[in-house]
Amino acid sequence: MSGNYLIEFSYLFASIFFIFGLKGLSHPKTARRGMNMAALGMLVAIVGTLLHHEIISYQLIIIGMIIGSAIGAAMSIWMPMTAMPQRTALSHAFGALAASLVGISEYYQHVVNDGAQISSFKMTALGFEVLFGSLTVTGSLLAFVKLQELIRGAPVTYKGQNIINVSLFVIAAGIFIYLIYDPTQSALFYVMVVLSFLFGILLVLPIGSADMPVVMSLMNSYAGLASAATGFAIGNNVLIIAGTLDGFSGFILSILMCKAMNRSVTNVLFGAFGSVSADTGQLVEGVMREVGADDVAVQLAYARQVVFVPGYGMATAQAQHAVRELAEVLEHKGVNVKYAIHPVAGRMPGHMNVLLAEANVPYSSLYELEQINPEMQATDVAVVIGANDVVNPDARDNPKSPIAGMPIIEVDRAHNVVVLKRGKGKGFSGLENPLFFKANTGMLYGDAKSSLSKLAQAVQQA
Amino acid sequence: MSVASLVPSICVLALAEGSGVSATALMASLYIFVLAAFLGYQVISRVPPLLHTPLMSATNAISAISVVGSILTAGGKYSDVSKFLGFIAVVSAMINVVGGFMITDRMLKMFKDRIGGGNDSGGKEGR
């Protein structure tokens, strides 16, 4: 009995330290210490669990822990920062897999193997666990495949998609409710598992790469809720607390991402998003003015304030270090350099901040949308690096645009705009961007990384 | 969300009636869930957008506490099928425990408030 108290106290300790850990994340200065506390909490909880009297054999546990730790450590040491969205998608899949396997295993053990009766309450918890878990596994894996560009990132849509998705969900939910009243129907349980796996794929299939931040946040939330449901199923409070914190964190992030794209939360929850219609009903007039690196360098060198606006293109070109080098050269010449970060720039929340931090850009020069927009009129040159929708003035000016109402970084209010772009194409969203046709916008084509290095050299000579 | 998530909880409560689960235990779990949700909302809305990527990997690492459920399944008095599923669950949860905390620390180490300065504590790699 005293052993049980010890374990319960280790869980209480872990819960408190997890909350301290997340509290630490409210500022970069306290974040590391907080996370170390959370890691300590995790260690204590795991050691406490290993003392549990129900454990009769340690063989599988030890082997599993060694394999898992090795894979986890290897992934975190060698994963490049640009691959952070992929890694996060994978880790959502792993977390959800663990939760749903525990659920399936519990069900198999009690219902199929022992032929015992389980309570409706336990069945409900197991059902939520397996439903959320399984759909997150396949959904996150598909997100991973799309982010890794193993398949095209474009939305996959077909006729009757929403009807198929909704009916699939209704069938799975119907089976779930039936199982609550009669948990012994193991065949139905397996059908429900398969349907949830399938539903995860169908949910993410119609979502384009540009909407990935929302998907990532949602999957984060579902994975957490699956863990919380595990806590209900096996009567473990620390699982409920940690899972709920994760679930809510993901939910808050998805709301923030939705606001940053002017989409409603309902729109997101029902998955009917991502298929941007290509027909905007508007043609943009004018020509795009191509500029050379030397001209841009002169503009930059004599500017008072330069604002860099990074997008996913900076990540694909691995250009974050080149940006910082150019910024340093400019600062050396007395130019005031700032970075403007849109909440949905990149493929996951905070993606750009991490990349720039990796390149040693101090976080005091990173500005959020609301902070930087009032300064745009006083900015001499805004340099857009592989960003498109987040600087598209149509979102503000054209109510018919599919992205109408989305808050943007108003680079078009700066005296001059330079857009670094790979080619003349429309980019991921398939939308025309009137910014590119404006008289004070210059287009600098080519790989962002080499363009930026060229600029840095030219500025030094200017 | 909190209201919406209460609905299934209340259904659960109704189901627990007559199924032999102690109402006290169930209510305690629900209290924990609801209070954790409120607390989570308070704590997490204070995290600046700057740290949203580390936040996601941190919460992911923390929710890998489901490893304790996996451990009990893999090592308990269970059938071989259940134990095997538990074993896979231990592997995947541990990937998130170790990988999640390590990569969060790797990211947080990079955030500095000015060039050359910052919050680095001597380059020591945390757990």
Image (cartoon, coloured by chain):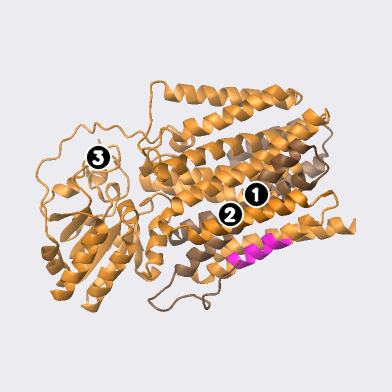
Q: Quadrant of residue A338?
A: bottom left
Mark 2 or mark 3, whichever is nearer to me: 2
Check disc 3 and report the residue beneath it: A431
Q: Is residue A52 magenta?
A: no
Dot 1 surroundings within 10 Å: few (below 14), some, or many (20 or more)? many
Mark 3 crowd level (few <14, some 14–19, many ≥20, 10 Å Cα): many
Chain letter of the brown region: B
The majority secondary structure of the magenta stretch comes to helix
Say if labels 2 and 3 share a chain: yes
Depicted A432 relative to depicted A272: above or below: below
Count of numbered tags = 3
What colour do you see for chain A?
orange
Q: Are labels 2 and 1 on one chain?
A: no
Tag 2, which chain?
Answer: A
What chain does mark 1 sit on?
B
Look at 50% across and 40% down and name the residue there: A141
Task: Give, as a single range, the part of the protein colored magenta.
Answer: A35-44
Q: CA distance from mark 2 to mark 1?
A: 9 Å
Q: Which residue is mark 2?
A: A71
Mark 2 and mark 3 lie on one chain; the one further toward the N terminus is 2
Does residue A36 belong to the magenta stretch?
A: yes
Residue denoted by label 1: B91
Mark toward the viewer: 1 or 3: 1
Q: Residue B57: horizontal and vertical position, in percent?
A: 53, 55
> Residue at 61% across / 34% down in the picture?
A131
- The reply to whether the C-beta atoms of the residues labelled 2 and 3 are less than 8 Å apart is no
The percent coordinates of residue A342 (x first, y second) are 35, 54
Amino acid marked by disc 3? Leu
Query: Which chain letter matches label 3?
Result: A
Q: Is residue A359 left or right of residue B127?
A: left
